[in-house]
Amino acid sequence: MRALLLLMLAVLGAGWSAPSRAVTLIEQAQLTLALRGQAPAQAPQPQTVALPYDWDQRQGAVDGEARFAFDIPVADPAAPLALFVPRLGNSFRVLVNGQELARFGAFPPGPYDDASVAPQYFVLPASGSTAPHRVEVVIAAQAARQGGLSPVVVGSKAEVLPLYEDALFWHVSGGRFIAIVSGVLGALSLLVWLRQREPIYLYYGLGELLWSVQTARVLFTHVPLPWPWWGVLPLAAFQAAVPLLCRFALAVVGRDDTRLARLLGLMAWLAPVAAVLGIMVPLLWLMPLWRSLGLLAALAMMVVVVRVALRSAVLEHRVLGVAVVLVVLCGARDVWVMRTSPEAYAMVPWIRFAWVGFAITLAWVIAERMRKDARAMAAMNASLEAELAERNAALEASFAREREGEKARGALEERQRLTQDLHDGLGGQLVGLLQMTQQPGTALGDVALHLRDAVDQLKLTVDAMHGCEGDVASALGSVRYRLGPRLQAAGIELHWDVGPLPLMTGWSVRESHQTQMLLFEAFANLMAHAQATRASLGARLVPTSTGEIIEIELRDNGRGFDAEAKFAGKGLTNMHTRAAALGGALTVRSKPGETCLRLRLPVPAATAAGK
C-alpha cells in the first residue's frame, strides 16, 4: 500500500510539473474569426485570446477559419529565429511580416489533411533590423477534428530545435513504437486464443489491436481514410480498447462473470456508436461524458483487481494489480490535465506508455501458466513413470510365472509323450516279444529281430530329446545313423540324397519324433517284407502355388504290395496318422520291383518369411 501511495503521488504530481521554457513563449494572440455559414453584420474585429486555442472547445460544432497575430521581438537582427508549435491545424498558413512562410493543406481542410496531430517547426529568416516580426498563423478547422493552435515557442535554432525534436520523439516515434508493439502483441494473443479459446487472450488481443489503431493516428499527416471516417475509426478503437482491457484484467483475477464485466462488454459494443455520434453528428459533449464513464468503470475495475491482489497469494494477480493502478492513475492524470492545464492541447498522454503494463501482465500470465503447466506435466510424467514401473514389475512377475508354468507344462507334456511313446512303441514291442517267447517253437531269429526294433525305437526316442526341434535334416540323419547298420546287415544298399532344408518354425520335440517314427516304420516294413536290395531316401524343398513344402521320398526295388489291400498289421495306418499329426500328407505307390512312399510337410509361413 505504501508503494501504491508513493506511485500515486508521483503520477499526480507530475501532472502539475512546470514545462521547459525556451527564450519566449507566446501565450496570447490577436484572433480574427470567420465561421462557416455565418455572415457577420459587420467586419469581424480582432480580439485578444489566450493560447492554447482548442477549436472544438471554443467554437463547438462549427467549421471556420481563425487568424492569430502576434509580435516576436528581435534581439539579434543577424540571427534567424525558430518557431516550435506543438499543435497546429487542421490546415494552416504561416505569414511573417505579410510574407507566406509555410502552408499545409487546403482551405477549408481537405478530407485527407490533418496536421494537428504532429508538432511543427519553422525557421524565420534574419530581418536585418530590430523591429519585431509580425507573425500571423491562419488555420482552417473542422468540428470534432481537434483543430486549433497551441502556445508558440520562440527562440534561436539552438534553443528551439531540441524542444521540437523531443516533442517529435514522444508524439510520433513513441506513438509508432506503441502502435507496433500493441499490434504484434494483439496478433499473438489472438493466435493463442484461436488455439486455447480462453477469454483473457481474446479480450487482450482485441484491446491491443484497437489500441494500436488508435495510437497510429499520430503517424499520419495525410491520413489513409477521408474525414470523418478517419476520425470515427481511431476514436471508436480507443473507446472499445479501454473496456476490453479492463475486462481482461477482471478475467485474470477470476471476476469476468460480474455486473461490472458485463457493463464493460456493453461499452465495448457501443463504442462505435458513440464515436459516430461524436464525430459525424457531431455531439461534442458526448466524448467528455464517455471518457468520464470509462474512467469510472476503470476505477471500479482497479478497486476489484487491487482487492483480489491484496488477498491473493498468486503472483500474477499482484503484478496485474500494480499494472492496473499505474494505467488508471495515468489515465486519471491525462483527464485532469486535459480539463485544467493550459498545456492540455499539446500534452503527451501518459496512458499511451503506461498501457505497456498490460503487456507485461499478459507476458507474466503466460509465463506463469507455462511454468505451472510444465510442473504439472513433470508431475504427471513422474506419476506415469511410477505407474509404468509398477505395471512393468507386475507384468514381469506375471511373465515369470507364465514361463515357469510353460516349463512345467512342457515337462509334463514331454513326460506324457515319453510315456505314450514307450507304451505304444516299446511297450507294444516288448509285449509282443513276451507272447512270442511263450509260444512253443518260436525261432530265436524272430525274437532277435523284434528286440532290435525295440532297441532302435528306444534310441530314436532318446535322440528326439536332444534339441533337434524343427531341424528336419537332423531328424532324418538320426534315422539313418540308427538304422544304417541294420540295413547293411540285411543286404540293402541305401542311397541318401537330402538337400538343404529350412528349420520348421513352431516344431517341438514331438513333431521331430513323429517324423522319425514314421520313417522308422517305413524302414522296418522295408527290411521285414520288401525283400529289396536297394533303397533311396531323398528330401528337398519344393515351391507350390500355396507356399513351400518339404518332400521326403523313400523308394526301394522290393517285390511290392497292394497299397489298397487290407492288412492285419497297423504299419500303414500308423504312418498315415503320424503324417496327419504333422499337418502333412502321405502317399504310397507300389508295384513289383518298385515301392514309393512320399511324405509332404508344409513349411510354416513364419519359416518362409524368415528365410
Image: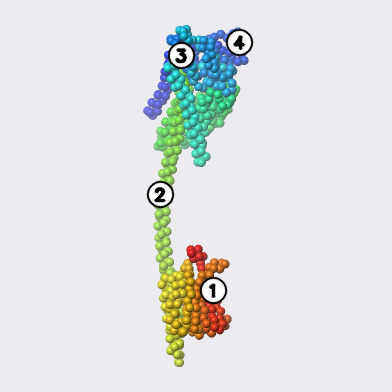
Neighbor class of circle 4 (other Cα within 10 Å; few <14, some 14-19, many 20+) is few
Q: Residue at x 50, y 32 (%)?
A: 183
Q: Which residue is mark 3?
A: 81
- State whether residue 122 is above or below residue 554: above
How packed mark 3 is, by other alpha carbons closer than 10 Å (few <14, some 14-19, many 20 or more), is many
Q: Are marks 3 and 2 in contact (CB under 8 Å)?
A: no
What's the amino acid at mark 1? Ala
In this rendering, the label closer to the viewer, 4 or 2: 4
Q: Residue 40 bears which disc, if any? A: 4
Foreground residue, 572 or 243? Answer: 572
Is disc 2 placed on a helix, strand or loop? Answer: helix
Q: Earlier in the sequence, mark 1 or mark 3?
A: 3
Could you tell which of marks 4 and 2 lies nearer the N-terminus?
Answer: 4
Q: Which of the numbered marks, if any, corresponds to residue 382?
A: 2
Mark 1–mark 3 Cα distance, whole angstroms, equals 120 Å
Task: Look at discs 4 and 1 and give the one toward the viewer.
Answer: 1
Distance Cα–Cα, label 4 vs label 1: 127 Å
